[in-house]
Structure formats: structure tokens, C-alpha cells
Amino acid sequence: MTAKPNIAVIGTGGTIAGKGEAVVNTAAYLCSVLGIDEILESIPDAAALANLRAEQLLQTGSENFGNEHLLAIGKRVAQLLAQPDIDGVVITHGTDTIEETAYFLHLTLKSTKPVVVVGAMRPPSAMSSDASLNLYDALAVAAHPSSHGNGTLVVANSEIHTARDVMKGNSFKLEAFRSPYGPLGYVIEGRPHFYRRPSRAHTVETPWSIDTLVALPKVDIVYGYGALGSNVVDFIGSGAHGLIYAGTGNGNVAAHLLEPLRRLAERGVLIVRASRTGNGIVLRNGSQPDDEYGWLTVDDQNPLKARLLLTLALTQHSDARALQQVFARY
Ligand code: DAS
């Protein structure tokens, strides 16, 4: 009989740690109430999958997570992965920004061991909560050899998603997560079934290591619409090193916003065109003369993922050409 893997489980809060007054409270409840030990107690069957070592790192809704939280989570996960007797890590997390933490880890961890981020859309106290099954599935994925080398994964609703692509696309349904090209696989009765692997570089193939990252440059997002005032663009862009402009359609920019964006670019703010649709490709020099303006485009990354990628890219490059290549590679 082979030894069970050792999986570290890090609690950070969210609905998966939430509690409502009544079982009907699927939407009105307190988040980040239950400790990670209490959550794990509700799934005794997980002991058959792995030896679990739980710790509480944070206890807050993921809507509060800034860059400093990402760094703190990443550094703790890296310490655990570096221990020879740890085979994988599961992080319980609020669903609101799970896609951002997961992508940050996907780009900065230097390990091929499985890392799985998991949340729930209904608290454990609610009718038909997805909390225990999602966590059980996440542990099953982290414990399984087929998960190695796939980067950071998000497990929800019996699906396994790559951190690069997954996004929360619904505010209350159990089926809240989707990846534009579909999940990598499914989890059924404690066993992952993978059908694809992430094709873009991640973890050990990237130049960013969580161990050496200290402070992150400020990158902000502006959501584009025709009535958006140029003063808003000026205000948001003025304190930032980079600005993701989430334009309409394929990254279109309203005519009256061209000037403020060009002004920001002249002052050294990196302007990156994305699409507020969160889907599809923004073609370089397509709807705007990006070469002429010195702007970048995101390829197929949604504005949130593009913000993280640009943040990391700016720790290494300032040259627009090198920065544009980052969007083609990751
Ligand atoms: N407050 C949200 C969060 O922590 C709730 C959730 O987990 O879905 O992200």
C-alpha cells in the first residue's frame, strides 16, 4: 500500500467559512466565521485522501485582498511547498477574487506540486451548500499525481479550472465559474479526470519568484463606456505605473478619452487595452494605432488577469516591446 500524500490546507475566509442564521440563508450570511479546523471536521472522508495539516493564515472576505495579501499568501504557500514532506497545498478562499489570487500564484510559485484554490457559493450552514464537496474535491485534486505540473488550479462545482483562464461569472449560482476554453477536467467521487493541460507558461517557467517579490507596482483598471469622464481617466491613471483600459467590444476607446490616455502614456503610465467583455482577443493595432501611441494590448486576458500580469511584468521590464511579449507568452 502506498503512503497517503501530505496536503497542507490554508484557511483565508470567505463563504466556505461562512455561517447563516437559517438553512434558507443561501445569500444573507456572515462570511469568514468558521476556522479551517471546523471546516475540515465536516468532511471526515477527506482523511482517506491525504494526511491534512491545516493552518489559518487569514480570516476575511476576498474582496478585501490587496497586493499585500497576495504576497502573504504566496510566500506562505511557497514555504510549505519547499518542505519535502508536503505534496500539495489547498487554499480555502472567498470566491469573489479567487481567480486573481490563483493567477498570481500560478505565475509566481516555483514548484510543480499541485496548488488548488477553492471556495463555495453557499456557506456550510445553507441548504445544498457546495462547501464540503468543493473542499473534498480540491483535496482530491491536490492529492492526486495527475495534478502535478498543471500550475495553480481552481476547483468548484466538480470542475477543475486553470488559474489563468477561470473567472467568476455569476454572483449567486453554484455554477459560478467558467473558463473561456472550458475546464481542464472534472472531479468525480474523489478522483480528478484531466482532459487538457494549460498551454501558456506558468510556475517554474516564469521569471517571477514569490520568494524575491517584495512590493508590487501599482496597476489600475478603468472600465470604459461612452459617458466616462476624461477627469476619471486622469485621476485613476495619475497614481499608477500601468493602466488597463477595459474598453468596449474589442478594446475600443471613446474618442474623447484618447487624449487623456495619450497624455498619461506620455507621462510614463503604461496603457494596456483590454476588453470589458472579459472574453476574446484584443488585436494589437486593431481598433487603435497602438504602435503609434505606445500602448499595449492584452491578447486574450481579461482586465483582472491583465492587471496582475502587467504588475508582475513591470517588476522586470519597462520597455514596451518586452512588456507586449509578456502578454503573448503567459
Ligand atoms: N465575500 C465573498 C468572498 O469572500 C464571498 C464568497 O466567498 O463567495 O469572496
Image (cartoon, grey):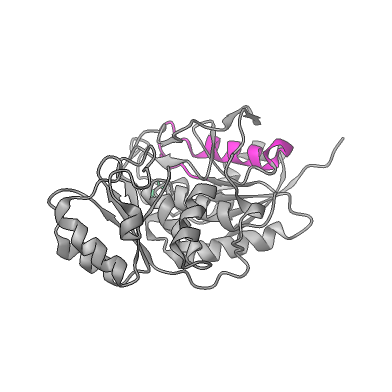
Asked whether, in this view, residue 59 is left or right of residue 150, the answer is left
Q: Nearer the viewer, residue 264 or 58?
A: 264
Residue 51 lies in the magenta-colored region = no
Range covered by the magenta-colored residues: 118-147
Q: Nearer the viewer, residue 247 or 174?
A: 247
Q: Quadrant of the N terminus?
A: top right
x and y percent of residue 264 in the render? 27, 67
> Is 327 rendered above or below residue 160?
below
Q: Taking the image as drawn, is residue 130 in sight?
A: yes
The residue at the far front in this view is: 292
x and y percent of residue 124 in the render? 46, 41
The residue shown at (55%, 61%) is: 73
The residue shown at (61%, 56%) is: 206
Q: Taking the image as drawn, is residue 101 in sight?
A: no
x and y percent of residue 75 in the render? 60, 65
Figure quadrant of residue 133: top right
> Is 241 rendered above or below residue 59?
below
The residue shown at (43%, 59%) is: 60
Residue 124 lies in the magenta-colored region = yes
